[in-house]
């Protein structure tokens, strides 16, 4: 049995959250740059969504094969390995020589994100001093969403206003990863009785019996919320450039950033509402945001798109933090990393499969109509998730 250290914990959760944010920023760094790659290499919007889906497949594979490995060998080694994968991904983009290397880079980025998702979340929460658990939970989910948002913002600004648009963003990320490695090395290890070699085999979907009552509702809400994030990170830049004729990469990166910023704001509201009310409320707000996003596509309105991004992000953040709090609070410490990873499996299925559908639909009906179909389907799914959690609300922790 694995015991997590408690007596010598010190308030290092903010440093761990910073590492988490750096790792996740690398996964969305290419988002505003896909248009440049498409022009340079000559591929379709379906190829863009497939490149994005390869990343999600890497996340899911990593979660399934190593979702709870940090429960066995410790948090710090897994975080360092994830940072190494993030560096390798950046190098693939830095020395990009064609589409195959882009696929490899996104796959490595997915592996990195999969390891970060459960491990970094558990690390942040376990490094919190007694009485600071709620703050640490917010720090973990905010680092996740904040990092995902900062990636497009950083690359969009650098690509638009600095030289080497397809090189400088990844050089900047490599510098941040080097700092994150130094910080990670200094973090205290929170897992005792560690194994040298973890057992091999599928792992991420093992949910302890005491968690299953809250897991279904939480996973459904996470799936719906991440499907919305998939729309903004994979499709919105193309909609801006092709439909709205907005070619400024900084604007593209800022709009994607606004979704994740609103998500972080939504997460901060969860503590006031509590898990039981935050889950259905988040789904309701997300549905309203999706309606606004659909309206922006129909009217070809940048202003409506921005408002839809903010409202959708707010709902996603509110529901996601409530789902995370419900699952992590119900999970026993020795299985927390694996249980959180299982939740992220559901989330990243939501961020990948619907986006591939959008890419395929684009070839048949065009980008605008494909986006309208996507938002309608996700809105219906989110409404179903809201009804589900209203009828079967999770217990407060």
Image (cartoon, rainbow, N blue to C red):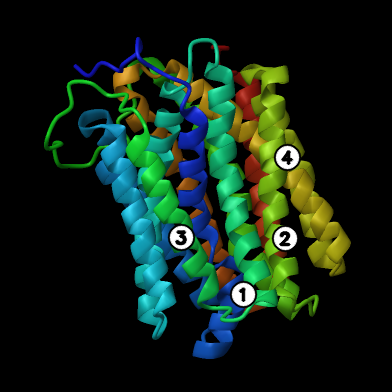
Residue 11 point in image, percent of width and height: 48, 22
Residue 49 point in image, percent of width and height: 52, 69
Q: Find residue 362 and name its label.
A: 1
At label 4, counting other C-alpha atoms closer than 10 Å, the crowd grade (few under 14, some 14-19, many 20 or more) is many
| Mark closer to the observer (3, 2) | 3
Q: Which residue is mark 2?
A: 254
| Mark closer to the observer (1, 2) | 2
Q: Is residue 166 left or right of residue 294?
A: left
Task: Mark 3 and mark 4 in contact? Answer it, CB < 8 Å.
Answer: no
Comes first in the chain, label 1 or label 4: 4
SS label for mark 2: helix
Comes first in the chain, label 3 or label 2: 3
Instruction: Estimate the spatial distance between the alpha carbons at disc 3 and disc 1, rounded to whole Å.
Output: 37 Å
- Quadrant, the N terminus: top left
Q: Residue at the location (32% across, 55% down)?
A: 84
Q: Which residue is mark 3?
A: 175
Residue 224 point in image, percent of width and height: 59, 43
| Mark closer to the observer (1, 4) | 4
Instruction: Estimate the spatial distance between the alpha carbons at disc 3 and disc 2, rounded to whole Å.
Output: 22 Å
Residue 42 in sight: no
188 up-or-down from 234: above or below: above
Q: Which residue is mark 4?
A: 314
Quadrant of the image occupied by residue 336? top left
Instruction: Estimate the spatial distance between the alpha carbons at disc 2 and disc 4, rounded to whole Å.
Output: 16 Å
385 up-or-down from 230: above or below: above
Instruction: Estimate the spatial distance between the alpha carbons at disc 3 and disc 4, rounded to whole Å.
Output: 31 Å
């Amino acid at each position: 049995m694995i015991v997590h250290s408690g007596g010598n914990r010190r308030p290092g959760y903010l440093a761990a959250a910073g590492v988490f944010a750096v790792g996740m920023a690398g996964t969305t760094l290419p988002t505003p740059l896909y248009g440049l790659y498409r022009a340079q290499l000559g591929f379709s919007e379906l190829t863009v969504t497939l490149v994005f889906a390869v990343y999600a497949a890497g996340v899911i594979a990593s979660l399934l094969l190593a979702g709870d490995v940090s429960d066995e060998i410790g948090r710090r080694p897994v975080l360092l390995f994830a940072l190494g994968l993030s560096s390798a991904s950046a190098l693939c983009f830095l020395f990009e020589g064609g589409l195959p290397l882009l696929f490899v880079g996104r796959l490595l980025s997915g592996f990195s994100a999969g390891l970060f998702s459960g491990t970094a979340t558990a690390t942040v929460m376990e490094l919190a001093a007694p009485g600071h658990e709620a703050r640490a939970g917010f720090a973990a989910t905010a680092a996740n969403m904040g990092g995902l948002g900062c990636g497009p913002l950083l690359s969009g600004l650098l690509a638009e206003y600095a030289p080497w648009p397809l090189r400088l963003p990844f050089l900047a990320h490599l510098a941040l990863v080097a700092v994150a490695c130094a910080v990670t090395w200094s973090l205290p290890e929170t897992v005792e009785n560690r194994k040298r070699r973890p057992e091999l085999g599928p792992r991420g979907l093992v949910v302890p019996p005491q968690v299953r009552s809250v897991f279904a509702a939480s996973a459904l809400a996470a799936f719906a919320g991440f499907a919305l994030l998939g729309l903004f990170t994979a499709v919105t830049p193309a909609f801006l450039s092709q439909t709205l004729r907005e070619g400024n990469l900084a604007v593209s990166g800022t709009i994607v950033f606004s979704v994740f910023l609103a998500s972080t704001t939504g997460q901060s509201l969860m503590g006031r509402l509590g898990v039981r009310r935050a889950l259905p409320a988040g789904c309701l707000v997300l549905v309203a945001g999706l309606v606004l996003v659909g309206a922006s596509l129909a009217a070809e309105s940048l202003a409506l798109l921005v408002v839809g991004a903010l409202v959708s992000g707010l709902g996603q953040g509110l529901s996601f933090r409530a789902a995370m709090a419900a699952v992590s609070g119900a999970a026993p410490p020795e299985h927390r990393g694996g249980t959180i990873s299982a939740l992220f499996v559901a989330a990243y299925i939501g961020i990948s499969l619907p986006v591939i559908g959008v890419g395929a639909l684009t070839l048949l009906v065009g980008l605008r109509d494909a986006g309208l179909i996507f938002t309608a389907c996700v809105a219906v799914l989110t409404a179903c998730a809201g009804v589900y959690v209203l009828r079967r609300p999770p217990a407060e922790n």
